Image: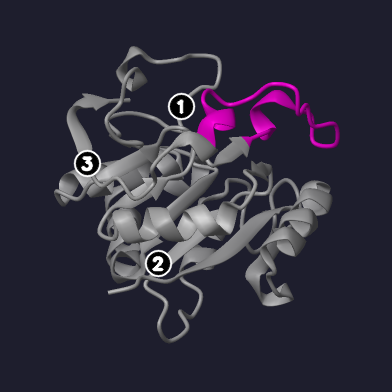
């Protein structure tokens, strides 16, 4: 079976320029981007969870099996869409984060990996997450019931995804190298710093993304 992934982007008005840049690069329509007012937005609140849930739960077109949701402060690897399809088809039943942990730390767990897919045990950067659409409703219903304070950032939505996956025995993995550079952690709202690179971001084209082996002894 060939799996298909659609892409949505959400963020705040101050990062609209970067949202529109990625919209053009990915060939998305106006219906694929969602922009909220900064601060405490009347519809989506202050923290991103409510907006993320709204975007993930958009109507899924026929034939789409996975949904990738990007935040507003990401830079894409070249030929990103080509590698996205390979990643989705290699790990169709997993929740997948397309960027690894803190770019300042090169974890020992990623040395000499037999596969670019690493199981996540703790926090990872949630700026780009793929979720099989068959999980979406159950995932957010469970999060709302289990963590009523999630709308105020307790826990953050990316950590909550990991908690749900662990609760249900579903693999939650990260790709090393990353195919997404999270530029927001080293920027102001308007002056991104593209000099710093997420660990292994530059090695995206050296990896066999079809390699389905998962080293279960390593985790981030």
Quick check: can you spot residue 178? no
| 1 or 3: tag closer to the N-terminus | 1
What separation in Å lies between label 1 and label 2 (alpha carbons)? 23 Å
Look at mark 1 in the image and give the residue it sits on. 101
Q: Residue furthest bottom?
A: 62
Crowding near pointer 3: few (<14 within 10 Å), some, many (20+)? some
Look at mark 3 in the image and give the residue it sits on. 213
Give, as a single range, the part of the protein colored magenta.
182-204
Q: Relative to the observer, which residue lies in front, 53 or 122?
A: 122
Q: Quadrant of the C terminus?
A: top left
What separation in Å lies between label 3 and label 2 (alpha carbons)? 20 Å
What separation in Å lies between label 1 and label 3 (alpha carbons)? 20 Å
Q: Residue at x 39, y 15 (%)?
A: 107
Number of numbered discs on residues = 3
| 1 or 2: tag closer to the N-terminus | 2
Which image quadrant for residue 2? bottom left
The percent coordinates of residue 217 (x first, y second) are 16, 25
The percent coordinates of residue 162 (x first, y second) are 31, 42
């Amino acid at each position: 079976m060939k799996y298909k992934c659609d892409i949505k982007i959400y963020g705040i008005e101050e990062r609209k320029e970067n949202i529109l840049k990625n919209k053009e690069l990915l060939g998305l329509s106006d219906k694929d981007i969602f922009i909220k007012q900064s601060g405490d937005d009347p519809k989506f609140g202050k923290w991103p969870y409510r907006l993320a849930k709204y975007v993930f739960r958009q109507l899924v077109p026929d034939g789409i099996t996975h949904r990738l949701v990007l935040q507003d402060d990401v830079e894409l690897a070249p030929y990103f869409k080509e590698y996205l399809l390979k990643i989705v088809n290699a790990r169709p039943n997993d929740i997948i984060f397309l960027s690894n942990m803190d770019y300042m730390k090169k974890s020992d767990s990623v040395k000499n990996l037999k596969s670019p897919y690493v199981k996540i045990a703790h926090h990872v950067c949630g700026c780009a997450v793929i979720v099989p659409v068959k999980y979406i409703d159950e995932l957010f219903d469970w999060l709302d019931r289990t963590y009523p304070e999630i709308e105020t950032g307790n826990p953050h939505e990316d950590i909550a995804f990991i908690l749900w996956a662990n609760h249900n025995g579903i693999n939650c993995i990260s790709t090393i190298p990353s195919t997404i550079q999270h530029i927001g952690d080293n920027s102001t709202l308007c002056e991104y710093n593209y000099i710093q690179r997420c660990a292994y971001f530059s090695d995206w084209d050296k990896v066999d993304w079809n390699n389905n082996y998962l080293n279960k002894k390593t985790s981030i």
